[in-house]
Image: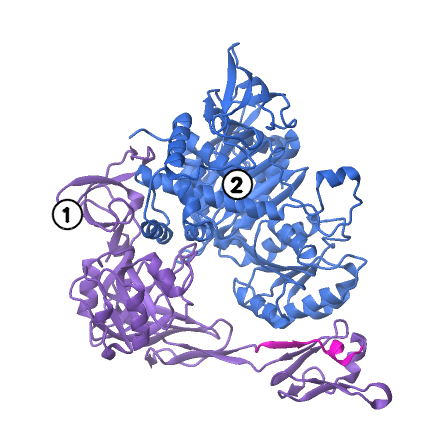
C-alpha cells in the first residue's frame, strides 16, 4: 500500500515528555536526579552580568583622557554606590572642583586613558529556571540545567504568542465550532487556561487579560485581530517573547476555524487538570510549535513508541487541508497516485485523492495536507 | 587539494542549506564538463539527528542511484574515481545550514566605515544582524545591551582611517568588551572579533578585547576615505567562519575532512561565481535568490561586486513582512481581481505558519506571484541603497559634473547598463510557465534598455561558486550550459508617455532571414518568439523622449538573445513605470499583458 509522509502536529493522549530546561549562561543546578518537582520549582539559576553605565568622565572633568586614571578616586575593580563621588578634578588654584558621580550601585569595570570613558557595571542579575511541568528530574546537564520527565497529554498548536504559563484547564464552549465570545468569560476564570472553539477576537482577548486569564487555546484568530491585539503586524513567525499578559495558542490557523474534534475532545477529557503551555513558535530551521502539556497523575507510565508518529499517510488516513480552496476541512485519503499530476495552476506535483465529508472526491497537492498525528 | 586539476573527470558538490541539502554530480563529457544528475535530502543539523553529514550522505545516495554508479562505500565518498568508474575525483561543499553566518558589524561613522564593514560582511556571505556606529543615535549602554542580546556568530569591528584618531574606535572596543558577548552556538568557545580598523588603534583594541574574545586583526577595510579594501576582512571572516563557527556546528568537523577545499558560506560562493562570470564576459549583472525566509541580491557593476541580504523578505517564513512593508494596495496592483483585506491577511499568515504549502488555484498563484514581485522589489531597493560608491569622499566638481549630478555615495546599480538579470529561488525557478518568471523579473527590477533575462534552473550557483575556486573552466562550462535557463531579452524604452503613443519602431532580423517590423505603443507588451541559443540583430529607433541606451530618441543597433519566452518589447514605460489608477483599466491592462506573454492558462 502506498505510504506518504506529511508533517503534522502531535495530538497525543498519553506520552512521556522529556522537558529540557536550560539556563542561557552556565550556572548552578538546584535539584538532583529523581527529585519530584512541580511546575514552579526552581531547578537552576545563574547570574547575568549586570548592565553597564558608561560615563564620559574626561569630558565632564575637563581633562585629557590620559590624565583620567590619576584623578579617579575609585580604581578599576572598586565597588561603588549610586551617588558616590568616584572622580574629582580641581580647577585653577584648587577652585571650581568638578566631580564624577556614580550613576548606579556596582563596580568600576574600566577607566580608559584613550577614550576618557569610565564604565560602571551594575550587580549581576539573578535568573532562575523553573521545572515548567510537574514531574521528576530525569537528567542533570552540569552547570546548564535539567531534563524533567512527565507522563502527560501532549498537544501541539500551529501558532502561538506569549511564553510559558500554567493554569487549570477549563472548557468555555461546548462545541469545537463555537466562537469564544467575550460574554462567555467570567471572573472565576482568573488564573486558568481556557479552551474555546473556532475563533477568538481581540475583544475577547482583552477581556481575558483584564480578568487575569493565563492562557487561551482556540481553533483560529483573524490576522487583523492579532495585529490589533499586539499593536503591530507580525512579520515573521518567531514568537514567545510577547508580554501581553496572556499566552494564546491557535490549533488550526488564521481565520475562523473549528478546532479539530480530536484536539477538542482531548482537552475536554483533561478539564480541571493543571496544564503547562507555551506559545513560543518558530517556523524556520529548527521548527518550534506551541505546546500544551497536561501531566497525568496516578496512572502507570507507558512509553509510546515514537515510530507511531512516522506512520505516514495511507489510504484511510484523516487529513486536514491547509490551503485554499478547501482550507480547514477534514478529509479521508482514498488514493495516493504515484505519478505527478497537473493542478489548475499547471504545476505538476504529487497529489492525494481524498473524500470530503459530503462524499465528493477531490485531488489535493500533498504539500497542502497534514496528518493529525497521534 | 591533492588531485591534479587536469586529471579531474568527475566532481561531486553539495550545498547544505537550512532545510535541504542539495547534491550535484558533474562529469567531463568529451572536452567539456556537464551536470549529470542532482539529488536532495533534508538537512540534518537540527535534532534529532544533529549531524550535517547524514543529510549529505542521503543526498549523495540519491545522486548515486540516479547516476547508476556507486559514489559511496559505506558512509565514505569514494575518491578519487576508480578505473571501473566508481566514485568521484573531488568533493566540495558550501553551507548555510543552522541559519548561516550571523554577524554584527561596528564602525565609527555609520555612512562610512560602518557601511564599508557591512559590505565586507555581506560580501563574505553573512547576514548582518545589526550595524553599530558611534553616530547611530544609540547610547553606549543601549549598544552594549543590543550586542549581548543578539548573540552573533562573529563581530567585525572597523573604524578610523589609518591617519585618523583612535579614540572612537577604541570606544567601540570598550562597548564590545562591556557587553561580554557570547557566541550563538554554545558556550565552550570565545566569540571571534575581527578588527579591521585604524592600524594605529591595534594595541589599544587588543588590550580591551584580547582577554574576552578571540580577537583577530587584519588590514583596515577603509585605510583612507577614498579607498575601500574589503578583501582581507572578507577572507578573514570566511576563515573564522570555518575555524570557529562551523567547527561548532554538528557534524561539520567530519564534513570539513571530506571536502577537497574549504567549505564556503553559500552566499559567498554565489557571489564568487557571479563576479567571475561578469568579469569573464565583461558584462554587468544583477542576480537574486528569493527563498522562504530571505532574499539575497547580488550585483556586479563597474567590476565591483556587492551583495545584500534582505533578511526579512521571503516567500514563506517572512511573507507577512512583505505584506506589512509593502501594503495591501501595492500587492493587489498586480492582481486582476478583488479580494477582501481580512481574507488576504489570513491567507498570508496561513502560508507563513505552513510554509511548505503551494498554490492550488490560479488565483492563489497570482497572489503569490504578486507578493514575489513586491518582495523582489523591496529587496532590490535595499540593494541599491547599499551598493554605492564611497561616501564621504571629497570630489573636485567640474562644470560637467554639475550637469551630471553624480555625487559620491550614489548607487552603483545602473539599470540601463545592466546586461543580465538572473533570478533564482522557488517562485522564479519553479513557476509553472517561464513567462511568469520573466514577467515577475521585469515588474520587480524594471530593467531599462536591453537586458537578458535568465533563471537559475535548480539553484546550483553555490556549488559552482566553490567549484570555480578549484576548476574555474568547469564551473563556467556548467554555468553556461546547465545552470542558466535563458528566458529571452527585455527591450524597455525609458521615458514617460501616454497610452497608445508610438514609442519604438525598427527592424529585428531573425535567423533564417525573416525580418520583423517593430511598432510598439506606450502601455503595450509584445513578445517575438526567438529560441534559446539563437540571436537576432536589431535596429531600434526610440521615439523622441525615449531612451534605449544611446540617449533620448537615438537609434541603437544591437544583438538580442533568444530564450524560452523570446524577445519581450516592454512599452509600459520607465522612470516612471506606472499602472493605471482606475481599477477597471488596471485589470484590463493586466489581462492584456498576461495574454501577450501567454502567462496563464485561459479558464
Q: Nearer the viewer, residue A37 or B380?
A: B380
Above or below residue A197? Residue B76 is above
Q: Nearer the viewer, residue B222 or B388?
A: B388
Which x, y percent locates residue B175? 65, 69
Residue range (magenta): A50-63
- Name which residue lies at 17% across and 45% down: A356
- Name which residue lies at 24% across and 46% down: A326
Q: Which mark is residue B288?
A: 2
Which x, y percent locates residue B318? 44, 52
- Name which residue lies at 68% across and 67% down: B173
Q: Secondary structure at mark 1?
A: loop
Q: Colour of chain B?
A: blue
Please, which chain is the residue tagged with disc 2 on? B
- Name which residue lies at 16% across and 63% down: A175
> Is disc 1 on the same chain as disc 2?
no
Please, which chain is the residue tagged with disc 1 on? A
Asked if residue B599 lies in the magenta stretch, the reply is no
Quadrant in which residue A306 is drawn:
bottom left
Q: Secondary structure at mark 2?
A: strand
The image shows a total of numbered marks equal to: 2
Which x, y percent locates residue A233? 42, 58
Quadrant in which residue A214 is drawn:
bottom left
Above or below residue B554? Residue A132 is below
The extreme left residue here reads A359
The chain whose colour is purple is A
Residue B549 seen in the current view = yes
Q: Nearer the viewer, residue A322 or B177?
A: A322
Badge 2 vs badge 1, beta-carbon distance below 8 Å: no
**How far apart in space, not on screen, are marks 2 and 1 (Cα)?**
44 Å
Q: Which residue is mark 1?
A: A357
Which x, y percent locates residue B161? 77, 57
Amino acid at each position: 500500500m502506498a505510504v506518504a509522509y506529511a508533517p503534522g502536529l502531535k495530538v497525543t493522549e498519553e506520552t512521556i515528555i522529556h522537558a529540557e530546561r536550560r539556563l542561557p549562561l552556565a550556572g548552578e543546578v538546584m535539584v538532583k536526579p529523581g527529585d519530584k518537582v512541580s511546575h514552579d520549582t526552581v531547578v537552576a539559576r545563574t547570574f547575568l552580568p549586570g548592565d553597564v553605565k558608561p560615563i564620559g568622565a574626561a569630558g565632564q572633568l575637563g581633562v585629557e583622557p590620559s590624565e583620567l586614571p590619576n584623578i579617579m578616586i575609585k580604581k578599576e575593580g572598586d565597588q561603588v554606590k549610586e551617588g558616590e563621588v568616584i572622580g574629582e578634578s580641581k580647577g585653577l588654584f584648587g577652585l571650581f572642583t568638578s566631580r564624577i558621580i556614580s550613576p548606579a550601585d556596582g563596580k568600576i569595570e574600566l577607566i580608559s586613558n584613550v577614550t576618557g570613558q569610565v564604565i560602571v557595571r551594575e550587580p549581576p542579575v539573578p535568573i532562575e529556571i523553573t521545572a515548567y511541568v510537574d514531574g521528576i528530574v530525569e537528567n542533570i546537564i552540569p552547570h546548564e540545567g535539567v531534563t524533567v520527565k512527565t507522563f502527560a497529554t501532549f498537544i501541539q498548536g500551529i501558532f502561538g504568542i506569549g511564553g510559558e504559563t500554567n493554569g487549570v484547564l477549563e472548557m468555555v464552549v461546548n462545541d469545537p465550532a463555537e466562537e469564544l465570545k467575550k460574554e462567555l468569560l467570567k471572573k472565576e476564570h482568573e488564573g486558568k487556561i481556557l479552551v474555546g472553539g473556532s475563533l477568538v477576537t481581540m475583544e475577547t482577548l482583552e477581556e481575558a487579560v483584564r480578568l487575569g486569564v493565563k492562557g487561551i487555546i482556540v481553533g483560529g484568530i483573524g490576522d487583523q485581530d492579532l495585529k490589533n491585539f499586539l499593536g503591530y503586524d507580525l512579520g515573521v513567525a518567531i514568537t514567545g517573547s510577547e508580554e501581553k499578559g496572556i499566552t494564546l495558542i491557535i490549533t488550526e490557523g488564521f481565520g475562523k476555524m473549528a478546532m479539530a474534534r480530536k484536539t477538542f475532545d482531548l482537552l475536554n477529557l483533561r478539564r480541571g487538570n493543571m496544564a503547562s503551555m507555551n506559545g513560543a513558535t518558530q517556523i524556520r530551521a529548527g521548527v518550534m510549535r506551541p505546546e500544551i502539556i497536561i501531566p497525568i497523575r496516578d496512572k502507570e507510565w507507558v512509553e509510546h513508541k515514537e515510530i507511531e508518529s512516522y506512520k505516514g499517510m495511507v489510504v484511510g488516513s484523516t487529513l486536514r487541508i491547509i490551503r485554499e480552496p478547501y482550507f480547514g476541512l477534514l478529509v479521508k485519503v482514498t488514493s495516493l497516485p504515484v505519478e505527478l499530476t497537473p493542478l489548475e495552476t499547471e504545476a505538476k506535483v504529487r497529489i492525494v485523492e481524498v473524500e470530503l465529508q459530503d462524499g465528493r472526491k477531490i485531488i489535493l497537492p500533498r504539500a497542502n495536507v497534514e496528518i493529525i498525528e497521534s | 587539494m591533492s588531485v591534479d586539476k587536469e586529471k579531474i573527470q568527475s566532481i561531486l558538490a553539495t550545498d547544505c542549506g537550512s532545510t535541504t541539502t542539495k547534491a550535484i554530480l558533474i562529469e567531463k563529457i568529451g572536452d567539456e564538463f556537464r551536470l549529470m544528475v542532482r539529488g536532495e535530502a533534508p538537512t540534518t543539523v537540527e535534532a534529532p539527528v544533529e549531524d550535517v553529514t547524514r543529510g549529505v550522505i542521503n543526498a549523495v545516495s540519491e545522486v548515486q542511484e540516479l547516476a547508476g554508479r556507486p559514489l559511496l562505500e559505506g558512509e565514505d565518498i569514494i575518491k578519487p574515481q576508480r578505473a571501473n568508474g566508481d566514485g568521484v575525483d573531488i568533493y566540495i561543499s558550501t553551507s548555510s545550514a543552522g541559519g548561516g553566518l550571523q554577524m554584527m558589524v561596528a564602525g565609527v561613522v555609520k555612512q562610512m566605515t560602518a557601511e564599508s564593514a557591512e559590505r565586507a560582511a555581506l560580501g563574505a556571505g553573512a547576514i548582518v544582524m545589526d550595524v553599530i556606529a558611534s553616530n547611530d543615535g544609540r547610547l553606549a549602554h543601549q549598544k552594549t545591551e543590543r550586542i549581548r542580546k543578539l548573540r552573533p556568530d562573529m563581530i567585525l569591528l572597523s573604524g578610523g582611517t589609518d591617519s585618523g584618531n583612535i579614540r572612537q574606535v577604541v570606544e567601540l572596543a570598550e562597548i564590545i568588551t562591556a557587553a561580554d558577548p557570547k557566541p550563538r552556538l554554545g558556550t565552550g568557545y570565545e566569540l571571534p572579533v575581527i578588527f579591521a580598523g585604524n592600524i594605529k588603534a591595534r594595541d589599544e583594541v587588543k588590550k580591551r578585547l584580547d582577554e574576552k574574545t578571540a580577537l583577530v586583526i587584519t588590514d583596515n577595510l577603509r585605510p583612507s576615505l577614498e579607498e575601500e579594501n574589503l578583501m582581507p576582512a572578507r577572507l578573514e571572516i570566511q576563515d573564522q567562519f570555518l575555524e570557529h563557527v562551523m567547527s561548532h556546528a554538528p557534524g561539520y568537523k567530519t564534513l570539513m575532512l571530506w571536502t577537497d577545499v574549504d567549505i564556503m558560506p553559500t552566499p559567498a560562493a554565489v557571489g564568487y561565481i557571479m563576479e567571475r562570470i561578469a568579469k569573464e564576459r565583461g558584462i554587468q549583472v544583477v542576480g537574486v535568490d528569493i527563498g522562504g525566509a530571505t532574499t539575497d541580491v547580488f550585483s556586479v557593476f563597474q567590476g565591483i561586486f556587492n551583495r545584500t541580504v534582505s533578511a526579512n523578505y521571503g516567500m514563506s517564513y517572512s511573507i507577512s513582512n512583505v505584506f506589512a512593508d509593502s501594503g495591501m494596495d501595492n500587492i493587489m496592483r498586480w492582481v486582476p481581481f478583488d479580494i477582501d483585506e481580512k481574507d488576504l491577511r489570513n491567507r498570508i499568515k496561513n502560508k507563513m505558519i505552513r510554509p511548505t504549502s503551494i498554490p492550488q488555484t490560479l488565483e492563489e498563484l497570482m497572489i503569490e506571484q504578486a507578493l514575489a514581485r513586491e518582495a523582489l522589489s523591496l529587496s532590490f531597493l535595499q540593494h541599491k541603497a547599499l551598493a554605492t560608491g564611497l561616501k564621504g569622499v571629497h570630489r573636485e566638481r567640474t562644470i560637467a559634473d554639475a550637469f551630471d549630478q553624480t555625487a559620491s555615495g550614489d548607487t552603483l546599480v545602473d539599470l540601463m547598463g545592466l546586461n543580465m538579470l538572473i533570478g533564482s529561488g522557488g517562485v522564479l525557478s519553479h513557476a509553472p510557465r517561464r513567462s511568469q518568471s520573466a514577467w515577475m523579473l521585469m515588474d520587480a527590477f524594471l530593467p531599462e534598455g536591453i537586458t537578458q533575462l535568465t533563471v537559475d534552473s535548480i539553484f546550483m550557483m553555490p556549488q559552482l561558486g566553490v567549484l570555480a575556486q578549484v576548476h574555474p573552466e568547469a564551473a563556467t562550462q556548467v554555468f553556461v550550459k546547465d545552470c542558466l535557463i535563458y528566458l529571452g531579452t527585455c527591450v524597455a524604452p525609458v521615458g514617460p508617455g501616454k497610452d497608445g503613443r508610438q514609442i519604438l519602431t525598427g527592424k529585428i532580423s531573425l535567423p533564417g532571414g525573416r525580418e520583423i517590423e517593430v511598432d510598439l505603443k506606450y502601455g503595450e507588451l509584445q513578445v517575438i518568439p526567438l529560441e534559446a541559443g539563437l540571436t537576432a540583430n536589431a535596429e531600434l529607433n526610440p521615439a523622441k523622449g525615449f531612451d534605449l541606451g544611446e540617449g533620448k530618441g537615438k537609434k541603437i543597433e544591437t544583438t538580442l538573445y533568444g530564450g524560452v519566452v523570446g524577445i519581450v518589447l516592454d512599452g509600459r514605460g520607465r522612470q516612471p513605470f506606472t499602472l493605471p489608477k482606475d481599477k477597471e483599466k488596471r485589470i484590463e491592462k493586466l489581462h492584456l499583458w498576461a495574454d501577450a506573454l501567454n502567462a496563464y492558462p485561459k479558464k
